[in-house]
Amino acid sequence: MTISPAVSAPARIVLEGRYVRLEPLERRHAADLFAVSTLPGGPERYRWLFHDAPLSLAEMAARIDLANAGQDRHVAVIDRQTGRAVGQQAWMRIFPEHGSIEIGGIHWGLPMARTRLATEALYLFARHAFDDLGYRRFEWKCNDRNQASKTAARRFGFRPEGVFRQDRIAKGENRDTAWFSIIDGEWPALRSEYQRWLAPDNFDEAGRQKTRLATRV
């Protein structure tokens, strides 16, 4: 049986959802992202990333320039209610010839963390990868010590695949990397559950969920 590659790498396009909009990351997002990083508790959200929170707006802008100079495709997560950037994420390990791609470089600021904004930001990436571009595999990786990230991966429907020991050095510390994935055969059922959970009638007036996302593995 011949397996077809994915259509292409993701283009620099806008992906629209009900609650968030994903835009190619640009310098115009720097002020919003720096503001989110400096909220009380904001710097702690960089604990497991490869760099600490930016110390200035200029540093945030420089990071955006550096990100866009590489091979990964970075996007800003825009809260459609406020029009402000509240986080960022990236397409990484992009292999159209193998139909494999990763969501990484995730920094979901406190205004979107553990809300429907974060879930929809993930869903829009997965839907675009599988439904629009024909990818076979969608990856999530994190520091094996990052329990919150591993819990999130399972909630989103990613299946654990094991740990790469001594995979990286992050901030002078060893990083064992936990690998997770969703594959194309699993996606139709997950897509239906995401759509059900993200429907407006699943949330009260304060944006609190009425039912949980039933994808956890």
Image: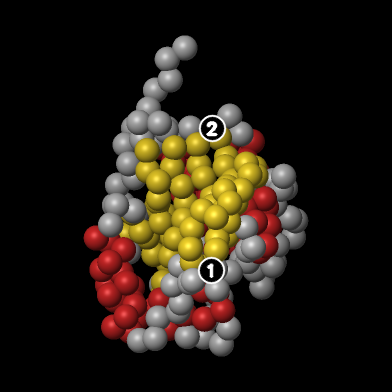
- Name the front one of labels 1 and 2: 1
Residue 196 location (% of width, % of height)? 65, 47
Q: Secondary structure at mark 2?
A: loop
Instruction: State the residue at coordinates (59%, 46%).
Output: 180
Q: Nearer the viewer, residue 163 or 37?
A: 163
Display colour scheme: secondary structure
In the image, taking residue 23 as reference, residue 165 lies left or right, namely right
Which residue is found at the position 56% from the left and 79% from the top?
44
Alpha carbon distance from label 1 to label 2: 35 Å
**Secondary structure under badge 1?**
strand
| In the image, farthest residue toward the right | 211
Q: Identity of the amino acid at label 2?
A: Asp
Identified at 58% across, 51% down, the residue is 165
Q: Amino acid at mark 1?
A: Glu
Q: Quadrant of residue 114?
A: bottom right
Residue 196 in sight: no
Q: Earlier in the sequence, mark 1 or mark 2?
A: 1
Check the image and report above or below for 121 versus 51.
above
Which quadrant: the C terminus?
A: top right
Viewed as shown, does residue 179 lie left or right of 55?
A: right
Please name whichever residue, 201 or 127, is drawn nearer the observer in this view of the structure: 127
Image position, residue 16 (x, y; %): 42, 54
Left or right: residue 5 versus residue 36 is: left
In the rendered view, tell whether residue 190 sits above or below residue 154. above
How many marks can you see?
Answer: 2
User: What residue is disc 1 on?
Assistant: 173
Residue 140 — which label?
none
